[in-house]
Amino acid sequence: MADMSVNEPLRKSPRIGPNAILQLEEPLDRMLGQGALAQILKITRVAMPSGKEMVPQEDVGLVHHTMWRLFPEQAGTLSDRAGVGTARYIAANRIPKAARVMLRILPRVWAERMLTKAISDHAWTFCGSGALDTRRENGEIHFMLRENPLADKVTQPPHRCIWHAAVFAELFSLVLGRPYYCKEVSCCALGAELCHFVVSRDRPTGHFKGLQL
């Protein structure tokens, strides 16, 4: 989900798509000034991704976690905006126009199932060494990510995986042409066994909202 532009032969290595880092640049520059991402990369000794290759999951996690430690008050919004940017990149560049048109005219349940399968099929681009399971229950789509490599188990106070939730909500909203919401109901960073995200049309309390269309 983080980036569907990389080559599948790399899928067995613990790597993540480059947009997990690249999409931080615009919100960081806008909120904290130009060069904020470069500052984080310098501190973490992580190279700026080229956008053409997968990035070691340790590097992605280090960049995100360092951002939370350096800018705790802004990190939630920054993660949300980066997740939205990642979803918009995927929708615009990795899903063919014909597929987007088809998904918007199909019955909602069919379209949701097809998009869920596409995300699951490309989970290797954002799971790294983790494993993703999906299910549909009571009209909701569940994504269960075990051993989430981006879950921040170090930063205090602990925080949920806002970036993932924003990607899910925005991707469903953009591709299916309806507002969707995502809530993380359990998180590895908070001591849970897995990160469990629930996507639905209903607005929950404490949600991540996809683009209103």
Image: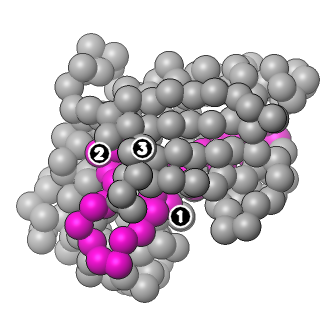
| Res 15 seen here | yes
Amino acid type, callout 1: Asp
**Residue in view at x 67 percent, y 63 percent:** 207
Of the two numbered discs 2 and 3 on the same chain, state the one appearing first in sequence: 2
List the residue tagged with mark 2: 149
Q: Is residue 54 magenta?
A: no
| Res 34 seen here | no
Residue lying farthest top? Answer: 9
Whole-angstrom CA distance, mark 1 to mark 3, is: 20 Å
Measuring from the top left, give residue 173's x and y in whole percent: 74, 45
Q: Is residue 196 left or right of residue 22?
A: right
Question: For residue 67, what is the image quadrant?
Answer: bottom left
List the residue tagged with mark 3: 194
Q: Is residue 205 left or right of residue 202?
A: left
| Residues rendered magenta in the picture | 148-177
Query: Height in image: 175 above or below 88?
Result: above
Give the tally of numbered discs.
3
Label 1 CA crowd tier, 10 Å (few <14, some 14–19, many 20+): many
List the residue tagged with mark 1: 80
Nearer the camera: disc 1 or disc 2: 2
Label 2 CA crowd tier, 10 Å (few <14, some 14–19, many 20+): many
Q: Is residue 28 left or right of residue 80?
A: left
**Residue in view at x 41 percent, y 52 percent:** 192
Whole-angstrom CA distance, mark 1 to mark 2, is: 18 Å
Measuring from the top left, give residue 124's x and y in whole percent: 37, 26
